[in-house]
Amino acid sequence: MDFGKYIAHRGLHSELVPENSLTAFRLAVEKCLSIELDVRLTKDCRIVVFHDNDLMRMCGIEGKVFDYTYEQLSAFKLKNSDEKIPLLSDVLKTVDGKVPLLIELKGGAPFGELESRVDHMMKKYKGEFAVQSFNPFSVMWFRFHSPKVTRGQLISKYRKNIEYIERFICAQPFIWRFISKPQFIAADLRSISFETAFQAVDIDADLLTWTGRGKELIETASQFSKTVIAEQFPDDFDFSDNWEGSCE
């Protein structure tokens, strides 16, 4: 699947435009940028586009996304803006197939619940898209239940928090070979190496890197893969030859 050179990480967001907001996605479409976004389930099983497990960083509210119904979540604002947490269905209407979507499946719901609901919704979508997850079993779900969907394994060996052990295990090639069997590997720039690139080639998978922040890191990430999940693009960044598709 061709994402082009750059994928807008959580949309084309900035200090003024919150991540994973409808405005961030509209701006990415205007630049003809593929879009990476995150999906979770609410308490009433609606699919929302939101990165964190809890609401504090983006909304200043205590609690986890899965603790609230969508009606309750719709009362909250993203950062210091008028933007609300969008439904995946609203994002699909906004993008309308103009650029490819890269959908990251987040945790918090019983296994198979989010996967099946995303799959059902995306079957009606006319645009190009792929799914990815740190959880190899989420990727495996699509391998068995919807094999035509392009799927990717997210990997990171970056030591940051308690998730390190789980992510370190999932970053091992035997996971890719026997569980997820992805069409692409999306590797953390902080822990990528040429060995990772060779391992991806060994299983006939494409390699993406994340997250290139700013011109220098975007250029560094481009040394490892033809597609970079990126943000903090400079104002004078050249997007003219980013993607060969039509954004009309």
Image (cartoon, rainbow, N blue to C red):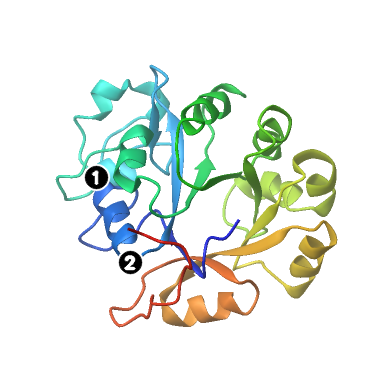
> At x 36% / y 70%, what residue is drawn?
232
Amino acid tagged 2: Lys
Residues packed near mark 1 inside 10 Å, few (<14), some (14 to 19) or many (20 plus): many
Left/right placement of residue 227 relative to residue 173 reads left
* First in residue order: circle 1 vs circle 2: 2
Instruction: Provide residue 206's location: percent of width, then percent of height.
Output: 69, 61
Instruction: Provide residue 202's location: percent of width, then percent of height.
Output: 85, 61
Instruction: Provide residue 204's location: percent of width, then percent of height.
Output: 79, 58
Instruction: Identify which residue, 177 or 60, lies in the foreground.
Output: 177
User: Does residue 24 sit above or below 239 in this rendering?
Assistant: above
- Viewer-nearest of discs 1 and 2: 2
Q: Which residue is mark 1?
A: 78
Query: Residue 199 is drawn in which quadrant?
Result: bottom right
Amino acid tagged 1: Leu
> Marks 1 and 2: CB-CB under 8 Å?
no
Outermost residue to the left: 82
Instruction: Identify which residue, 14 or 47, lies in the foreground.
Output: 47
> At x 53% / y 67%, what residue is drawn?
228
